[in-house]
Image (spheres, coloured by chain):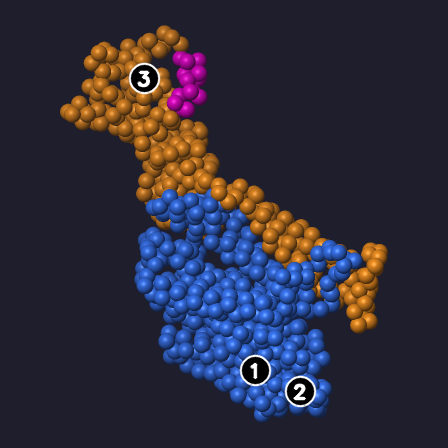
Chain colours: A orange, B blue
Amino acid sequence: MLDKQLILGVYDDGDKLLSSVSKLRKKGVEVFDCYTPYPVHHLDTELGIKRSNLTVGAFLCGMMGFFSGLLLQFYMMTNHLNTFKSWPMMIGGKPQDYTMIPSMVPVTFELTILFTAFGIGILFFAKSRMIHGKIAEIVDPRQTDDLMFLAIEPSEVGDSISRADLNSFFNESGAIEVRDYDGGNSTSTATVALVEKAALETVVEEATETISDEARTEKIDMIKSVIGEATVENKDDLKKISGVGPVYEEKLNSLGIYTFEQVSKLTPESIQAIEELTKYFPGRIEREDWMSQAKKLMEG
Amino acid sequence: MYEAQIRQPLVEGNKTIADVSNDICRPIENKPTKLWWLGFTISFFFLMIMVLSLGWTTWEGIGTWGVNKTVMWGWDITNFVFWVGIGHAGTLISAILLLFRQKWRMSINRSAEAMTIFAVLCAAQFPLFHMGRVWLGYWPLPLPNAFGSLWVNFNSPLLWDVFAISTYLSVSLLFWYLGLIPDIATVRDRAKSKATKFWYGFFSMGWNGSARTWHRYEIVALILAGVSTPLVLSVHTIVSMDFATSVIPGWHTTIFPPYFVAGAIFSGFGMVLTLLIIVRKVLNLEEYITIGHLEAMAKVVMLTGSLVGVAYLTEFFIAAYSGVVYEQYAFLNRAFGKYWWAYWTMMSCNLLAPQVFWFKWSRTTPWFLFVMSIIVNIGMWFERFVIIVTSLHRDYLTSSWAMYSATITEVGIFLGTMGLFFTCFFLFSKFLPVVNMAEVKSIIKSRE
C-alpha cells in the first residue's frame, strides 16, 4: 500500500480523468499523480511531466555498445592495439588491419543494439524505482484493473481551492467517488484517526498560537450555549460518527462536546467555531453531515 | 477519441475496461481445461522425444545424423533457419507495427512476441548441438582462454550469428517482459491466493500504474521497438550470410539478405496464424482477435509470399541471363534433379498457394486460414531444405556429389522442437495473459 495521505478522485473513464486534471491545474491545484490501468493519452503533458531523458541515456548506452564492439574486434583481429603477442589471426590470408572493418559491421551493430536495449531497460527500472520483489505502492487494487485515480495532496486544499469546492468539482467532472486516503483502506475509521492525528499534530501548534486563551473560552461558551452542556459521565461513543476518530473525539471532549444530542444540534456558527479551534479538514462536518448522523445514532 | 468509419472495430462486443481484465485473466484464474491438458501432454511428449534425440546425439555423436562431408548441413540448419524465421514475425508485429502506429497489433502482439522467444529457443538448439561437442558450446564466445588466448574469427558469418541470435533472444525477452509488467500487476492485484499474489507480485516489480512511470514506459517501448526493427532485419540478414558469403552456386547470391527477411516474415506470419486461430477459439477471445485481425495477417502473408515468389523467379532469371553454367545447372537440378519433389512442394506452397488470398473469403474464414497457415509453414521449411541440400549435394567438385537423407534422430529432434515450442506456448497461455490488456484497454471506446 502507498504510505501517504491523499485525496483521491476515482474515475472509470480516461477522457474524464484527463479533462479533470487539465481543469484542476488551470485552477492552480497541483495534481500529485494519477494511477491508471493503461496509459491515458496526453495525461503526461496535462500533468506537466517533462519529457524523460531516458532517450539520451539510451543513446549513450548505444554508443558504449558501438565502441565496445569495435574495440573487441580491433583487439582480437588486428594488431592496431599491439595485441598480436602470440596469435596473429591469419585466416586464409584475409586482411588483419583496419581494412577488415566491413567484416566488423555485424557484430558492432548487434552489440550497439544489445547495449541500447539493456541500458534503457536498466535505466527505466532504476528511474522508476522498480525491482523484483518490491511491494507495489498502490492505493486500490482496481487501479491496475478498471479504475483510474486522481491523487491530490491534502496540503493543496485550502489555498487555491476549498475542500467543498474540490468535492463538487469532482462530482461535476464525472468522478464516481471521492476518497480520503491514508496508507490503507480509506473508508475505515482507523484511517480517519491516523489522518486526524497527523493533521492535528502538524496544525495543533498553529491553533494554539493563533487563538488566545480568552478567545478560546469565548468560543467554547458560545458553542455550549447553542448545543447545551453535557458531562463525561453520560458521554456517547462519538467515534460512531463517520469522520470522527479517537483523537478527534478527545478534541471534541476537550471542548465540552460529549453526546450525540449535542452534535445533532450543531449550527453553522458553532461549526465554524469548532473548526477554528481544531483546524481539521474544514468543511468536513457539514459535508459528512455529522448532525444527521448523530440524530440517527441517538435513536439507536 | 477519433474513430475511423471505414475500419472494423478492433474490439467487438461492446467491452468495458473491466471486461478486458475479466476475459483475459480468466484462463489464468481458472483451473486448466481438459483441452489444455490434452495439448500440454502431447506437446510435452514430443519435448521428451527431443530430449531423447539430443541426448542420443550428444552421447553417440553426429554420426547419428545423416549429414556427410558433402552435404554437411541437412535438417539441422534447415530447422535452425526455419525457427529463426518464425521468430521474426513476432518482432515485426510488436516492433514494426508499433512504429507504424497500427493499432490492430495490440491484441496479438503478446502472443506473437511469446512465439518469437519460444521459436528462437528452438532455433538455438541446432547451432549448439550441430557442432558435436555440446559441452564445449561456449567456445564460439570471445572469452580469454588458455590457448594463447585463441580468439574467434570475426570474419565469419557463423560467428556473427552467435552475436545476432544471442542479441535477438535477449532483446526479444526484454521487450516481451517489459510489455508484460503492467498485466502481471493486474493479475497480482486480482489474486485470491497468497502464492499467486507473491509470484505475480515478485515479477511485477512494484508496478502501480503511476502516470510518471507510464510516461517513461511508453518511451522505453518506443525505443525498444526502434532497435528491434533493425535487429530483426540484421539477424536474418546475418543468417542469410551463412550461405551468401560462401562460393557455391545456389548460395553465393546477393539476393539472399532481402529474400530471407521476406521469407522469415512470411513463415512467421504463417505460424502466428496457426497459433492465434487456435488460441482465439480455445480461450474465447474472438472478440479481441477478430476476423479483421486475421484478415490483416492474411494480407501480410499474401504480400511477403509474393515477394518470396518474385525472389525465386529473379534467381531463376539471373541464372539464365548470366550465362554462368554452374548457376544454371544449380537451378535446373533443383527443379528436375533428385530432390525435385522438395522443390515443387516449395514452389506450390510458397508461390502459388498464397495467391488464393486475393479472394476475400479466403482471408476471412478461420478454418481455411488455418489450413493455409500450415501450408505456408510446410512450404517455408522446404525452401530452406531445398536451398541447403540441393546446393550442397551438387557443388563444383563432381567427385564429392552425394545424397542426403535424414535419420530418425534428426526427425526426432525436429519433432521434438515442435514439442518444446508448444509446451512453452501452453505454459504461457496458462500463466500469463495472452493479450496485452493494458494496450487493449486504451482502445476501448468510452461510454458516453
Q: CA distance from mark 3 to mark 2?
A: 100 Å
Rendered position, B259 above or below B13:
below
Q: Position of residue B98 (x, y in %)?
A: 51, 61
Q: Is residue A201 magenta?
A: yes
Left or right, A13 with reference to B421:
left
Rendered position, A71 above or below B282:
above
Label 1, secondary structure: give it. loop
Q: Residue at x 41, y 81 (%)?
A: B359
Residues in magenta, as a range? A197-211
Q: Amino acid at mark 1?
A: Ser
Q: CA distance from mark 2 to mark 1?
A: 14 Å
Name the residue tied to disc 1. Answer: B405
Q: Is residue A177 magenta?
A: no
Q: Residue at x 54, y 57 (%)?
A: B173
Q: Quadrant of residue A200?
A: top left
Left or right, A90 with reference to B76:
right
Left or right, A22 with reference to B230:
left
Marked residue chain, label 3: A
User: Same subunit under labels 3 and 2?
Assistant: no
| Prevailing SS of the magenta stretch | helix
- Label for residue B401? 2
Q: Amino acid at mark 3?
A: Glu
Q: Residue at x 64, y 54 (%)?
A: A115
Using the rendered image of the protein, determine whether residue A216 is visible from the camera's viewpoint. Answer: yes
Q: Quadrant of residue B293?
A: bottom left
Q: Amino acid at mark 2?
A: Trp
Rendered position, A157 above or below B173:
above
Marked residue chain, label 2: B
Q: Position of residue A223 (x, y in %)?
A: 27, 14
